Amino acid sequence: MNRLQDYLDAHDINEIHPSDIAKILKQLDDEAFSSAIKLIPKDLLGDVALALPDRLFDDVVESLSLDELSHAVTELESDDQVEFLQELEELDETKASQVFNSLDEDDKQEITKLQTYSEDEAGAYMQLEVFTAYKDEIVQDVIKRFAKLRKENELENVQNLFITDKENKLLYTVGLDDLLIFDFSKMLFENIEMSDESFEPKSGVDSDDIKDVVHAFEEYDLSVMPIVNPYGILLGRITSDDIYDIINEHATEQMYNLAGVDDDAEEDDEILKAGKTRATWLGLNLFTAIAASLVISLFADTLEAIVALAVLMPIVASMGGNAGTQTLTVVVRQLALGDISQGDAMRIMKKEVTISLGNGILFAIIMGIIAYIWFDIPLLGVVIALSMVINLLSAGFFGAVIPLFLKKLDVDPAIGSTVILTTVTDVVGFLSFLGLATYILL
């Protein structure tokens, strides 16, 4: 807590970043945390709370009065207000309702408007606070108005001026750096017509899928995107910081899904909830392991006759599993980034199968020689070499096909892919190795 006090004393409130305060708070124990919350400037409480993990957000809410929560929400931008209230509602619906009812009418209307969008629509992530001007306004007047709004903290994180007609239809997007080199005595549209630059806006529609907006930010290296309705009327903007959050959340979700855990459950402090989610996937994995064991049991006589097979068997399955995971991870990530189009499926499969086949042949030769030297059984080296080629080939093929197939079904490719692939590589590995051993060695 002393560290937080020292930090606040050493900085002007306008220089303080909520993330820096959040870093300090995360290092405190429960008792010190509750006391430290009281030290945070009220204008920053909302931003600091949103910068903290969910488990600490709950602690912040419990440490604040209803009036303090209302003030914290008031100081946030519209999109952050919605996020704050959603998290508060998950924690305490009654308190969330009380905070909402305490807000002024403008905030209520903005929040209600944003809440009408589903979580996968661009409109759900936009800020309604935008800096706009009509095309026939004098540049000097626009700059004076911007300076006034900025001094009054009515606008934050502004990089662009959105120019509209009288019906608020978006016409142009002008960066503030371009605005400063305009002729201040002329109207905006006169400067635009005289310029060699293109000020055509890269805009999104409020009903667009947020994934398409993310791809547009990446493709055009945008810092902000205006959001319009289907008729071109300016509604708000999405900024790069929101896009970074979306990318981070999606990447985290994918990593958790590939490991068979739920991101929402893992971010909670509830051990039972997280344990239940993991147990579901472990239970599914148990059945796949039993399926692999049933394959092994079919060759019990072969294993009894040649003990060396039991020693080498895990190597085949392990190499196939690792090769499949490599392919699976690459394909799932490329799908998430939009690097694989609908017509790219065959190209991806050819690439992954070729890589797996090449690695299969390489390690088949290595392992075949090792098996021959180890057990002094020449044909055993042939068996494991052939099995390794078959298993790595199938690992590459199914590692690419499974996520592509799930994507075709409009299912997140990360969900369930690992369990399915592990089953395939184990069954194919054991079946090929023990089957070839039975046919060649006995």
Image (cartoon, grey):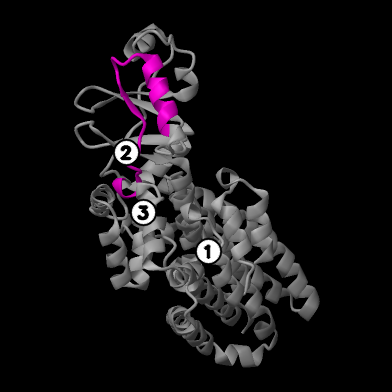
Mark 2, residues whose alpha carbon is within 10 Å: few (<14), some, or many (≥20)?
many
Could you tell me the amino acid type at mark 3? Gln
Percent position of residue 391, x then y: 56, 67
Query: Where does the N terminus fall, quadrant-wise?
Result: bottom right
Name the mark on residue 395: 1
Type of amino acid under label 2:
Gly
Which one is in front, 380 or 5?
A: 5
- Secondary element under disc 2, as helix, strand or loop, is strand
**Residue matched to label 3:** 81
**Residue placed most toward the observer, 275 or 39:** 39
- Placement of 142 over or under 17, stated as above or below: above
Given residues 267 and 13, the one toward you in this image is 13
In the image, which is nearer the foreground, mark 1 or mark 3? 3
How far across and how far down the image is residue 238, in percent?
38, 41
Front: mark 2 or 1: 2
Instruction: State which region is magenta.
Output: 123-149
Which residue is denoted by mark 2 in the rendering?
236
